Amino acid sequence: MTSEDTTNTHLESIEEQDITLQFRDQLAKGDGDTLAQWIDTLEPDAIVHAMAHLSGEEQLLILRILDPEDAADLIDDLPDEHSADLLEEIPVAEAADIVEELDSDDRADVLAEMSEDDAEAILDEMEQEEAIEARQLLSYPSDTAGGVMVKEYVAFPLGTTVEEVLNDLRGNREEYSSYNVQYFYVIDHSGKLKGVLRLRDMVLSPPQRPIDEVMIADPDVVRVDLDLQSLQRMLEIHSYSALPIVDSSDRLLGVAIEKDVAEAARKSANKTMLKLVGIFGGEELRSMPTLQRIGRRLPWLCLILILTVCAASVIPLFEEKLTPEMIVALTMFLPVVAGMSGCSGNQALGLSLRELALGIVRPWDLTYVLAKEIRVSLLNGLVLGLLLCIIGYILNGDYWLGIIVGIAIMCNTVISVCIGGVLPLIVKRLKLDPATVSSPILTMIVDASGFFLVLSLALAILRLTGIEAGVVDPP
């Protein structure tokens, strides 16, 4: 890093600390309107950083002195998990007022991060229409079109004229200002989608012309249960900024907006990454309560502990068959073989999870994935085996020891890569979460097979040659 980079980083750190102090100064004034105006001048990243470094009491006080609309704007800039934690700590009526001011999709995202009891308490305090809408959105899985759609859209019945539409837009311009107004929708009396109106077509059409003659009939639509990856690809392929979402009867339910879909895909990828490193229950933030953070980490650590003990139980099977000196000589290489093979397996595991998410592979593409991974694993295993063979000889002065660990890591690399490649596909076919289930299973298999290969190869060479690796010099 250059001195200029260091200076810039230092200045940025000072600036962020200064914003946190300014938050406290503004808070001390106790004026919600002044605080809201000042917050409007900040970038979202600065707000997130400053809020995370304020105390819990200060954060709650900020929410309580802002009016609900301004508090909702602040909540909208924070991660959903952080927002949910704050709203759970303030009185239910105040939390409901804030949640009502959020856009429908953001409202559902925040409520989904709360405990069921807290979310229900807030929903019970909300206006009936907003509560019904929120419950509907919460009923859809987060990785489907229904889970990312918004209810803020403009629809007009068949037979409406262009003039009536334009008058409605003018009369409700304040309400519609936050909507995706590039498209409007035409529905029949039962709510079925009949067409899409483009703003430019409306402006250029005669006032008395019925919108039935202006609309794009039979537009592209998305079923409410379509998976997130397919929805994202559809938006990208056709360069749509939004797509209408319908149920099985073609009734218009909501709209999928491109930026919201991209954000949902990013959140999904983050959750997958967190599961791979052993953090469950959503994103973890250091601003969260300590016990909550422990609850998201400890179950994984306990599971890995149990699986590691199971894998290590292979070692006692060879204690009576190998001399203590040989076991000591091999001990330093057991974690090397298991660890390096595990890294290779996790590479294949991560690639399969990504390709599953992108739709590049399907759960039944086992032979395709296996064929591709065998080629990579054989070459990587050969190189790693030769390197470890040389390292084993240099460290121990025993070429038999080098041969044992070299062959072991080569074979275990092939095993781990092949298993890592196909395991997520198998788990997906079983209707389980591949990001959650695959990693611990792979860890146990790779560790156990690594230990077994090293020790069984040592035993085989001992029986064939009578040479005890690491104990006597070979002839």
Image (cartoon, grey):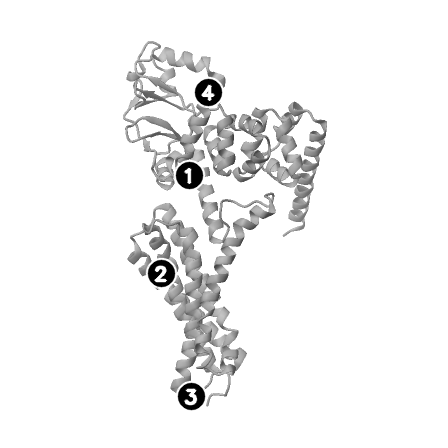
Type of amino acid at the residue the image marks with label 4 = Tyr
Q: Which residue is mark 1?
A: 142
Distance between mark 2 and mark 4 Cα atoms: 52 Å
Give yes or no for contact between labels 1 and 3 (Cβ–Cβ under 8 Å): no
Q: Which residue is at the front of the view, 228 or 434?
A: 434
Label 3 and label 4: CA atoms lie apart by 85 Å
Q: Please tell me which of labels 2 and 4 falls first in the chain.
A: 4
Above/below status of 173 relative to 299: above
- Residue drawn 67% across the image and 35% down it: 58
User: Residue 23 at what x, y percent from top left?
Assistant: 68, 33
Crowd band around label 3 with a 10 angstrom C-alpha radius: few (<14), some (14–19), many (20+): few
- The residue lying toward the viewer, choosing from 10 and 282, is 282
Marks 2/4 in contact by CB < 8 Å: the verdict is no
Locate residue 372: give its quadrant: bottom left
Q: What residue would you read off at disc 4? A: 176
Of the two numbered discs 3 and 2 on the same chain, state the one appearing first in sequence: 2
Element on which disc 3 rests: loop
Which mark lies nearer to you, 2 or 1?
Answer: 1
Q: CA distance from mark 3 to mark 2?
A: 37 Å
Q: CA distance from mark 2 to mark 1?
A: 32 Å
Q: Secondary structure at mark 4?
A: helix
Q: Secondary structure at mark 1?
A: loop
User: Residue 466, labelled with which disc?
Assistant: 3
- Asked if disc 4 and disc 1 are in contact, CB closer than 8 Å, the reply is no
Q: Are marks 2 and 1 in contact (CB under 8 Å)?
A: no
* Amino acid type of the residue tagged 1 in the rendering: Ser
Q: CA distance from mark 4 to mark 1?
A: 26 Å
Q: In this view of the protein, which residue sits in the foreground, 25 or 407?
A: 25
Residue denoted by label 2:
373
